[in-house]
């Protein structure tokens, strides 16, 4: 029992001494010239045209740097992934090398949101898992993802801490680490979230956010998330135009459940969104 308590405590990171991301964020204007695969994707003509057609009016992808975010997230990276003997940072470093040409490895979703919120409130941050999106070249398929990442996990950490994925069975991720403990690394193929189909793959404004490890930049894919988190109280919204909400909901079977989870985290939304989701 003592060991369990100690382990969970490792994943409670106090943000009191960190800078508030909402105050110290700095917009990055030259991100389109960077070499990481994600920037090449989100600056492409196809991606930009899709955003214009599907996102709420007046929004576009935004990129930020933040010393506060880097400080809090850096603390999380030093923790051990359960059952592997490796830190989160070491696992992520290994994932960048699962193919000969290298891979882009990006933190997505809830942890990005919660680090920003924690820096704002000073509340301890408890991490259930790290959702990681991987992009290893244009020809790297979902089958390649399943094979390459599982081989990396099994070779380095043993099959007991590696789940197999099977897209045909609806299992589109590989978990690295003991699933019943906090701090696992859940890996996903890039096409599941970071792509040019917001209606199909984006959840809410505050979860459609990415942290890119090489340049240490926060990527707000919808351009809405950072502003929503930094409001008092924090807000969230459906990131696509109202006319596309019904289509969007068809790809979000857990939309109402996610709504209530955000409400429990003190997030609020506007009346039309609430009435549509609940």
Image: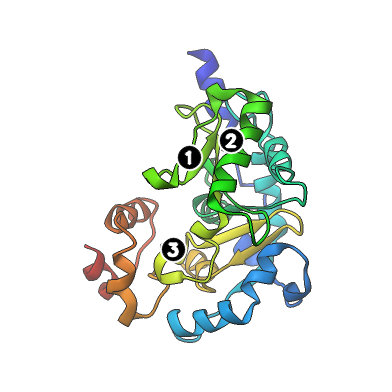
SS at mark 3 in the image = helix
Say which residue label 3 marks. Answer: 201
Confirm whether residue 270 shows in the render: no
Estimate how packed mark 3 is, as few (under 14), some (14 to 19) or many (20 or more) residues with alpha carbons within 10 Å.
some
Q: Earlier in the sequence, mark 2 or mark 1?
A: 2
| Distance in Å between CA atoms under marks 2 and 3 | 24 Å
SS at mark 2 in the image = helix
Residue 215 horizontal side relative to residue 58, left or right: right
In this rendering, the label closer to the viewer, 2 or 3 = 2
Report the label total: 3
Position of residue 129 measured from the top left corner of the image (x, y, whole percent): 52, 40
Say which residue label 2 marks. Answer: 150
Q: Closest to the observer: 48 or 223?
A: 48
Q: Earlier in the sequence, mark 2 or mark 3?
A: 2
| Distance in Å between CA atoms under marks 1 and 3 | 19 Å
Position of residue 133 measured from the top left corner of the image (x, y, whole percent): 58, 52
Residue at x 47% of width, y 68% of height: 228
Estimate how packed mark 1 is, as few (under 14), some (14 to 19) or many (20 or more) residues with alpha carbons within 10 Å.
many
**Could you tell me if the residues under marks 1 and 3 are in contact, i.e. CB atoms within 8 Å?**
no
SS at mark 1 in the image = loop
Residue 70 vertical placement versus 163 (above, below): below
Residue 222 horizontal side relative to residue 56, left or right: right
Residue 239 vertical placement versus 203 (above, below): below
Q: Quadrant of the C terminus?
A: bottom left
**Could you tell me if the residues under marks 2 and 1 are in contact, i.e. CB atoms within 8 Å?**
yes
In this rendering, the label closer to the viewer, 1 or 3 = 1
Residue 173 vertical placement versus 64 (above, below): above
Residue at x 50% of width, y 32% of height: 163
Residue at x 72% of width, y 36% of height: 90
| Distance in Å between CA atoms under marks 2 and 1 | 8 Å
Using the image, tell me which numbered label, if any, was put on residue 165.
1
Q: Quadrant of residue 97?
A: top right
């Amino acid at each position: 029992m003592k060991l369990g308590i100690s382990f969970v405590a490792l994943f409670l990171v106090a943000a009191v001494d960190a800078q508030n991301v909402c105050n110290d964020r700095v917009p990055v204007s030259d991100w389109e010239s960077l070499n990481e695969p994600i920037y090449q994707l989100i600056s492409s003509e196809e991606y930009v045209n899709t955003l214009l057609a599907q996102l709420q009016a007046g929004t576009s992808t935004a990129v930020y740097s933040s010393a506060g975010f880097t400080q809090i997230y850096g603390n999380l990276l030093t923790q051990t992934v359960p059952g592997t003997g490796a830190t989160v940072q070491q696992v992520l470093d290994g994932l960048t090398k699962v193919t000969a040409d290298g891979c882009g490895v990006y933190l997505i979703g809830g942890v990005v949101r919660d680090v920003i919120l924690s820096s704002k409130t000073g509340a301890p941050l408890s991490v259930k898992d790290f959702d990681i999106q991987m992009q290893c070249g244009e020809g790297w398929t979902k089958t390649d993802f399943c094979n390459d990442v599982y081989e990396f996990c099994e070779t380095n950490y043993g099959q007991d801490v590696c789940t197999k994925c099977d897209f045909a069975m609806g299992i589109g991720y590989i978990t690295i680490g003991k699933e019943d403990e906090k701090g696992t690394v859940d890996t996903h193929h890039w096409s599941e979230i970071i792509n040019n189909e917001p209606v199909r793959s984006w959840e809410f404004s505050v979860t459609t956010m990415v942290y890119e490890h090489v340049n240490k930049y926060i990527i707000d894919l919808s351009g809405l998330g950072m502003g929503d988190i930094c409001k008092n109280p924090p807000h969230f919204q459906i990131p696509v135009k109202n006319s596309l909400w019904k289509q969007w909901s068809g790809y979000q079977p857990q939309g109402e459940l996610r709504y209530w989870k955000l409400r429990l985290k003190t997030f609020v939304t506007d009346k039309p969104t609430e009435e549509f989701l609940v």
